[in-house]
Image (cartoon, rainbow, N blue to C red):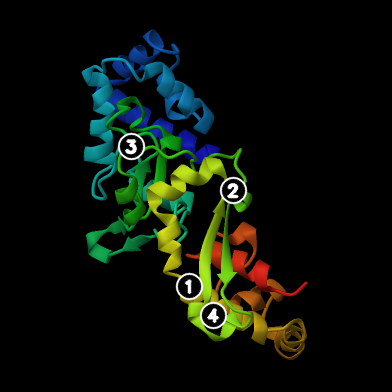
Protein backbone atom coordinates (compact mmCIF):
# COMPACT_ATOMS: atom_id res chain seq x y z
CA UNK A 1 0.00 0.00 0.00
CA UNK A 2 2.82 2.44 0.81
CA UNK A 3 4.36 1.86 -2.63
CA UNK A 4 1.03 2.66 -4.30
CA UNK A 5 0.67 5.79 -2.17
CA UNK A 6 4.20 6.93 -3.08
CA UNK A 7 3.48 6.45 -6.78
CA UNK A 8 0.24 8.42 -6.35
CA UNK A 9 2.17 11.34 -4.89
CA UNK A 10 4.88 11.27 -7.57
CA UNK A 11 2.30 11.40 -10.37
CA UNK A 12 0.51 14.32 -8.67
CA UNK A 13 3.79 16.13 -8.10
CA UNK A 14 4.72 15.67 -11.77
CA UNK A 15 1.32 17.01 -12.86
CA UNK A 16 1.62 20.11 -10.66
CA UNK A 17 5.16 20.80 -11.83
CA UNK A 18 4.12 20.54 -15.47
CA UNK A 19 1.50 23.21 -14.83
CA UNK A 20 3.89 25.28 -12.69
CA UNK A 21 1.59 24.87 -9.69
CA UNK A 22 3.73 22.73 -7.42
CA UNK A 23 5.60 25.52 -5.62
CA UNK A 24 2.40 27.52 -5.09
CA UNK A 25 0.55 24.59 -3.55
CA UNK A 26 3.52 23.36 -1.54
CA UNK A 27 4.29 26.84 -0.16
CA UNK A 28 0.71 27.34 0.98
CA UNK A 29 0.94 24.25 3.16
CA UNK A 30 4.41 25.19 4.41
CA UNK A 31 3.28 28.67 5.39
CA UNK A 32 -0.03 27.76 7.05
CA UNK A 33 -1.52 25.41 9.61
CA UNK A 34 0.90 22.65 10.51
CA UNK A 35 3.65 24.07 8.24
CA UNK A 36 4.09 20.77 6.48
CA UNK A 37 4.83 19.90 2.86
CA UNK A 38 2.36 18.93 0.18
CA UNK A 39 3.91 15.46 0.24
CA UNK A 40 3.05 15.10 3.94
CA UNK A 41 -0.55 16.06 3.19
CA UNK A 42 -0.92 13.72 0.23
CA UNK A 43 0.61 10.76 2.07
CA UNK A 44 -0.97 11.43 5.48
CA UNK A 45 -2.40 8.33 7.17
CA UNK A 46 -5.93 8.25 8.60
CA UNK A 47 -4.93 9.61 12.00
CA UNK A 48 -2.84 12.44 10.55
CA UNK A 49 -5.60 13.38 8.10
CA UNK A 50 -7.80 14.25 11.06
CA UNK A 51 -5.10 16.53 12.49
CA UNK A 52 -4.64 18.23 9.12
CA UNK A 53 -8.37 18.86 8.87
CA UNK A 54 -8.41 20.43 12.33
CA UNK A 55 -5.52 22.80 11.54
CA UNK A 56 -6.51 23.85 8.03
CA UNK A 57 -10.31 23.75 8.15
CA UNK A 58 -10.90 27.45 8.90
CA UNK A 59 -8.64 28.97 6.26
CA UNK A 60 -9.76 30.87 3.20
CA UNK A 61 -8.47 28.65 0.44
CA UNK A 62 -6.64 30.32 -2.47
CA UNK A 63 -6.97 29.29 -6.11
CA UNK A 64 -3.92 27.01 -5.90
CA UNK A 65 -5.67 24.85 -3.30
CA UNK A 66 -8.88 24.72 -5.30
CA UNK A 67 -6.67 23.64 -8.20
CA UNK A 68 -6.27 20.29 -6.41
CA UNK A 69 -10.04 19.80 -6.73
CA UNK A 70 -9.77 20.69 -10.40
CA UNK A 71 -7.02 18.09 -10.87
CA UNK A 72 -9.24 15.48 -9.23
CA UNK A 73 -12.49 16.28 -11.05
CA UNK A 74 -11.26 17.12 -14.53
CA UNK A 75 -8.29 14.80 -14.88
CA UNK A 76 -7.80 12.11 -12.24
CA UNK A 77 -11.45 11.03 -11.96
CA UNK A 78 -11.95 10.78 -15.74
CA UNK A 79 -11.41 7.38 -17.36
CA UNK A 80 -10.13 8.97 -20.58
CA UNK A 81 -7.78 11.45 -18.90
CA UNK A 82 -4.85 11.21 -16.52
CA UNK A 83 -2.24 13.04 -14.47
CA UNK A 84 1.54 12.77 -14.37
CA UNK A 85 3.57 11.03 -17.04
CA UNK A 86 2.37 7.42 -16.84
CA UNK A 87 -1.34 7.69 -17.66
CA UNK A 88 -2.26 7.59 -14.00
CA UNK A 89 -5.88 8.13 -12.99
CA UNK A 90 -8.63 6.69 -10.77
CA UNK A 91 -8.93 3.62 -12.99
CA UNK A 92 -5.24 2.88 -12.55
CA UNK A 93 -5.44 3.50 -8.81
CA UNK A 94 -8.36 1.09 -8.35
CA UNK A 95 -6.53 -1.55 -10.39
CA UNK A 96 -3.40 -1.21 -8.27
CA UNK A 97 -5.35 -1.35 -5.00
CA UNK A 98 -7.11 -4.55 -6.02
CA UNK A 99 -10.21 -3.65 -3.99
CA UNK A 100 -13.08 -5.38 -5.79
CA UNK A 101 -15.82 -5.23 -3.14
CA UNK A 102 -17.17 -2.05 -1.55
CA UNK A 103 -15.42 -1.66 1.84
CA UNK A 104 -18.30 0.38 3.23
CA UNK A 105 -21.18 -2.08 2.72
CA UNK A 106 -19.57 -5.36 1.59
CA UNK A 107 -22.59 -5.80 -0.71
CA UNK A 108 -21.42 -4.76 -4.20
CA UNK A 109 -18.57 -5.44 -6.61
CA UNK A 110 -16.52 -2.37 -7.60
CA UNK A 111 -14.25 -3.84 -10.28
CA UNK A 112 -12.85 -2.22 -13.41
CA UNK A 113 -14.46 -3.22 -16.72
CA UNK A 114 -12.55 -3.58 -20.00
CA UNK A 115 -14.79 -2.29 -22.83
CA UNK A 116 -12.30 -2.87 -25.62
CA UNK A 117 -12.01 0.15 -27.91
CA UNK A 118 -13.92 2.25 -25.38
CA UNK A 119 -11.18 1.64 -22.83
CA UNK A 120 -11.31 0.53 -19.22
CA UNK A 121 -14.07 1.92 -17.04
CA UNK A 122 -14.53 1.58 -13.30
CA UNK A 123 -17.75 0.54 -11.60
CA UNK A 124 -16.41 2.07 -8.40
CA UNK A 125 -16.56 5.68 -7.32
CA UNK A 126 -13.97 7.38 -5.14
CA UNK A 127 -15.46 8.68 -1.94
CA UNK A 128 -13.60 11.47 -0.19
CA UNK A 129 -13.61 10.44 3.47
CA UNK A 130 -13.23 14.16 4.22
CA UNK A 131 -15.38 15.95 1.65
CA UNK A 132 -13.43 17.70 -1.10
CA UNK A 133 -16.08 20.45 -1.08
CA UNK A 134 -15.45 21.27 2.57
CA UNK A 135 -11.75 20.37 2.62
CA UNK A 136 -10.34 21.02 -0.87
CA UNK A 137 -6.79 20.71 0.46
CA UNK A 138 -7.40 16.94 0.81
CA UNK A 139 -8.88 16.47 -2.67
CA UNK A 140 -5.89 14.36 -3.81
CA UNK A 141 -4.71 12.89 -0.49
CA UNK A 142 -4.20 9.17 -0.98
CA UNK A 143 -5.85 7.85 2.19
CA UNK A 144 -8.76 10.25 1.74
CA UNK A 145 -9.78 8.48 -1.48
CA UNK A 146 -11.94 5.43 -0.71
CA UNK A 147 -13.05 3.17 -3.59
CA UNK A 148 -16.73 2.52 -2.96
CA UNK A 149 -19.89 1.44 -4.74
CA UNK A 150 -22.09 4.18 -6.27
CA UNK A 151 -24.84 3.49 -3.71
CA UNK A 152 -22.58 4.12 -0.70
CA UNK A 153 -20.96 7.16 -2.30
CA UNK A 154 -24.41 8.63 -2.98
CA UNK A 155 -25.63 7.95 0.56
CA UNK A 156 -22.55 9.44 2.16
CA UNK A 157 -22.13 12.46 -0.15
CA UNK A 158 -20.58 15.19 2.06
CA UNK A 159 -21.64 13.63 5.35
CA UNK A 160 -19.10 12.65 7.97
CA UNK A 161 -18.60 9.07 9.06
CA UNK A 162 -16.53 7.91 11.99
CA UNK A 163 -14.33 5.09 10.68
CA UNK A 164 -12.29 4.82 7.49
CA UNK A 165 -11.67 1.43 5.83
CA UNK A 166 -7.99 2.47 5.74
CA UNK A 167 -7.77 2.84 9.53
CA UNK A 168 -5.31 0.12 10.56
CA UNK A 169 -6.09 0.73 14.24
CA UNK A 170 -9.56 -0.75 13.79
CA UNK A 171 -10.37 -4.47 13.97
CA UNK A 172 -13.36 -4.52 11.64
CA UNK A 173 -14.03 -8.19 12.42
CA UNK A 174 -15.07 -7.14 15.91
CA UNK A 175 -16.40 -3.63 15.26
CA UNK A 176 -19.32 -4.99 13.24
CA UNK A 177 -20.82 -8.48 13.07
CA UNK A 178 -23.85 -9.92 11.32
CA UNK A 179 -26.10 -12.01 13.54
CA UNK A 180 -29.52 -13.61 13.30
CA UNK A 181 -32.57 -13.71 15.55
CA UNK A 182 -34.61 -16.94 15.44
CA UNK A 183 -38.34 -16.54 16.02
CA UNK A 184 -38.91 -20.26 16.47
CA UNK A 185 -36.99 -23.40 17.39
CA UNK A 186 -37.16 -24.60 13.79
CA UNK A 187 -36.34 -21.29 12.11
CA UNK A 188 -34.45 -23.10 9.35
CA UNK A 189 -37.79 -24.35 7.98
CA UNK A 190 -39.49 -20.98 7.49
CA UNK A 191 -37.77 -17.88 6.15
CA UNK A 192 -40.16 -15.60 8.06
CA UNK A 193 -38.94 -17.16 11.33
CA UNK A 194 -35.48 -15.65 11.02
CA UNK A 195 -34.29 -12.05 11.16
CA UNK A 196 -30.98 -10.39 10.36
CA UNK A 197 -29.38 -8.24 13.03
CA UNK A 198 -26.23 -6.12 12.96
CA UNK A 199 -24.13 -5.87 16.10
CA UNK A 200 -21.64 -3.01 16.16
CA UNK A 201 -19.58 -0.79 18.43
CA UNK A 202 -20.52 2.75 19.39
CA UNK A 203 -17.82 4.23 17.19
CA UNK A 204 -19.19 2.30 14.20
CA UNK A 205 -22.69 3.70 14.70
CA UNK A 206 -22.29 6.72 12.44
CA UNK A 207 -21.08 4.53 9.56
CA UNK A 208 -24.07 2.23 10.07
CA UNK A 209 -26.53 5.12 10.08
CA UNK A 210 -25.08 7.03 7.13
CA UNK A 211 -25.03 3.96 4.88
CA UNK A 212 -28.33 2.60 6.21
CA UNK A 213 -26.71 -0.79 6.73
CA UNK A 214 -29.27 -2.10 9.22
CA UNK A 215 -32.14 -1.74 6.76
CA UNK A 216 -29.99 -2.90 3.84
CA UNK A 217 -28.98 -6.11 5.56
CA UNK A 218 -32.60 -6.92 6.40
CA UNK A 219 -32.98 -7.56 2.66
CA UNK A 220 -30.64 -10.54 2.94
CA UNK A 221 -32.84 -12.68 5.17
CA UNK A 222 -33.09 -15.23 2.36
CA UNK A 223 -29.32 -15.72 2.36
CA UNK A 224 -29.23 -16.20 6.14
CA UNK A 225 -32.09 -18.69 5.77
CA UNK A 226 -30.13 -20.64 3.16
CA UNK A 227 -27.00 -20.69 5.33
CA UNK A 228 -29.08 -22.05 8.23
CA UNK A 229 -30.33 -24.88 6.02
CA UNK A 230 -26.85 -25.63 4.74
CA UNK A 231 -25.46 -25.79 8.26
CA UNK A 232 -28.07 -28.45 9.02
CA UNK A 233 -27.37 -30.34 5.82
CA UNK A 234 -23.57 -30.10 5.84
CA UNK A 235 -22.92 -31.54 9.27
CA UNK A 236 -19.40 -32.31 10.43
CA UNK A 237 -19.83 -35.96 9.51
CA UNK A 238 -21.21 -35.00 6.10
CA UNK A 239 -18.30 -32.65 5.44
CA UNK A 240 -15.89 -35.37 6.47
CA UNK A 241 -17.48 -37.73 3.97
CA UNK A 242 -17.33 -35.12 1.19
CA UNK A 243 -13.68 -34.53 1.95
CA UNK A 244 -12.99 -38.25 1.79
CA UNK A 245 -14.90 -38.85 -1.46
CA UNK A 246 -14.17 -35.60 -3.31
CA UNK A 247 -10.99 -34.31 -1.71
CA UNK A 248 -9.20 -34.34 -5.04
CA UNK A 249 -11.48 -31.54 -6.25
CA UNK A 250 -10.36 -29.08 -3.58
CA UNK A 251 -6.98 -27.77 -2.49
CA UNK A 252 -8.13 -27.61 1.15
CA UNK A 253 -11.17 -27.75 3.42
CA UNK A 254 -11.71 -23.98 3.25
CA UNK A 255 -12.16 -24.18 -0.51
CA UNK A 256 -14.61 -27.06 -0.15
CA UNK A 257 -16.71 -25.09 2.34
CA UNK A 258 -16.62 -22.02 0.10
CA UNK A 259 -18.06 -24.06 -2.75
CA UNK A 260 -20.73 -25.62 -0.57
CA UNK A 261 -21.78 -22.40 1.16
CA UNK A 262 -21.36 -20.18 -1.88
CA UNK A 263 -18.98 -17.70 -0.32
CA UNK A 264 -15.86 -17.17 1.75
CA UNK A 265 -16.24 -18.06 5.43
CA UNK A 266 -13.00 -16.90 7.07
CA UNK A 267 -12.96 -13.37 8.56
CA UNK A 268 -9.70 -12.58 6.74
CA UNK A 269 -11.47 -13.23 3.41
CA UNK A 270 -14.49 -11.01 4.13
CA UNK A 271 -13.74 -8.50 1.36
CA UNK A 272 -13.03 -10.94 -1.44
CA UNK A 273 -16.67 -11.30 -2.45
CA UNK A 274 -19.92 -9.43 -1.74
CA UNK A 275 -21.66 -10.49 1.48
CA UNK A 276 -18.74 -12.67 2.56
CA UNK A 277 -18.87 -10.89 5.92
CA UNK A 278 -22.51 -11.90 6.35
CA UNK A 279 -21.89 -15.47 5.21
CA UNK A 280 -18.87 -15.97 7.47
CA UNK A 281 -20.45 -14.39 10.55
CA UNK A 282 -23.70 -16.37 10.25
CA UNK A 283 -21.80 -19.59 9.57
CA UNK A 284 -19.69 -19.14 12.71
CA UNK A 285 -22.85 -18.67 14.78
CA UNK A 286 -24.71 -21.64 13.35
CA UNK A 287 -22.01 -24.26 13.00
CA UNK A 288 -21.91 -26.82 15.75
CA UNK A 289 -18.69 -26.81 17.88
Q: According to the image, label 3 marks what residue?
A: 85
Q: According to the image, label 4 marks what residue?
A: 226
Q: Which is closer to the viewer, label 1 or label 4?
A: 1
State which tag comes first along the sequence, 1 or 4: 1
Q: Quadrant of the C terminus?
A: bottom right
Q: Which quadrant of the figure has residue 227?
A: bottom right
State which tag comes first along the sequence, 4 or 3: 3
Q: Nearer the viewer, residue 142 or 193?
A: 193
Specify whether 190 is left or right of 76: right
C-alpha gap between disc 4 and disc 3: 50 Å
Residue drawn at the location 47% of the way across and 77% of the way down: 222
Q: Nearer the viewer, residue 61 or 94?
A: 61
State which tag comes first along the sequence, 2 or 3: 3
Q: Which is closer to the viewer, label 3 or label 1?
A: 1
State which tag comes first along the sequence, 1 or 2: 2
Q: Position of residue 288 (x, y in %)?
A: 74, 75
- Helix, strand or loop under label 2: helix
Amino acid sequence: MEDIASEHYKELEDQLKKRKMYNKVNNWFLNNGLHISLKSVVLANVDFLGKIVYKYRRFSYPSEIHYLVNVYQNLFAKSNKSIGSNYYNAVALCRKLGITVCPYCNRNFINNVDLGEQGIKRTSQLDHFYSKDKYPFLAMSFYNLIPSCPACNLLKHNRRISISPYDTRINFEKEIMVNYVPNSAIFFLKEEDIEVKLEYSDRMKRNINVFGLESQYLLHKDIVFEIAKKCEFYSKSQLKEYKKNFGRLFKNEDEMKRVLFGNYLKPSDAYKRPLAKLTGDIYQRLVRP
